[in-house]
Amino acid sequence: MVELTKAQIERASKISTPTLHEAAGRIGALPSYLKPVSPDMKLCGPAYPVRGPACDNLWLHRALYKAARGDIIVFDPSGFSEAGYWGEVMTEAALAAGLGGLVLTGSVRDSDVLPRQGFPIFSAGVCIQGTEKDQGGQGFLGTPLMLGDVLISQGDLVVGDQDGLVVLSPEGLDDILEESERRDAKEVDLIARLRAGERTIDIYGLGEGE
């Protein structure tokens, strides 16, 4: 099994999610409804997938102390978003545990405080409805999780920025990072050419049209 390295995480953290997605062959994009709680929030690290019952955040509490430092918790409450599964208190616990961020297909609360706490969170929205903690509820820690058309396994790379989220397997990741860096360098050159007066239709050979 190929494991994600610190060097790969560092390289990926400097690359935008659209570039990684394109360089990977247009795979790994999570659903676009998942947005950062604050536009300046970014995350990059190994995935720790978690699933729990709807309107219940007990498995999130458990994940706080099972995930490793730097991990990104990816939590799906059985597809139910109309509840505030995460807020100020859990953010403080995540910071104390040294976690790298949260991707939540449910909603958050305390949205006025979360941006100031310095912990990156991507969620489906904001909701004041509370959650339960059913000791008998069924959930999973660290087992593969499907979000949209992306299967997320523990240790996959998760990268999030203002444009969205992308998840990539460590397998073949070096090639994707190299292609991403080539794309970024090419874009710098392209922008310079545009500023010098060239046209996109000429650069890309698109023709004038009718």
Image: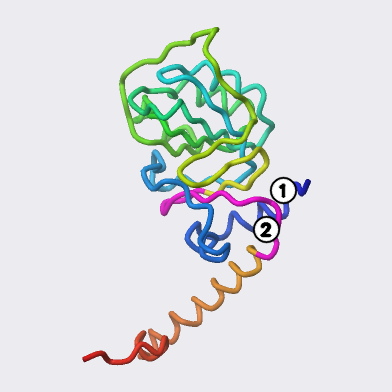
Q: Which residues are magenta?
A: 160-175
Position of 2 relative to 107 (above/below): below
The quadrant in which the C terminus is found is bottom left
Residue, disc 2: 173
The verdict on residue 161 being magenta is yes
Indicate the position of residue 99 as horizontal and vertical percent values: 61, 33
Do the residues bearing badges 2 and 1 touch, measured as CB atoms within 8 Å? yes
- Label 2 or label 1, whichever comes before in sequence order: 1
Residue 148 among magenta residues: no
The label shown at residue 4 is: 1
Task: Say how the picture is coloured.
Answer: rainbow
Q: Is residue 146 above or below residue 184?
A: above
Query: Residue flagged by tag 2: what amino acid is it?
Result: Leu
Q: Provide residue 206's location: percent of width, then percent of height.
A: 36, 87
Residue at image x 33%, y 30%?
126
User: Percent position (x, y) of residue 190?
Assistant: 46, 82
Amino acid found under the numbered disc labelled 1: Leu
Picture quadrant where residue 23 is located: bottom right
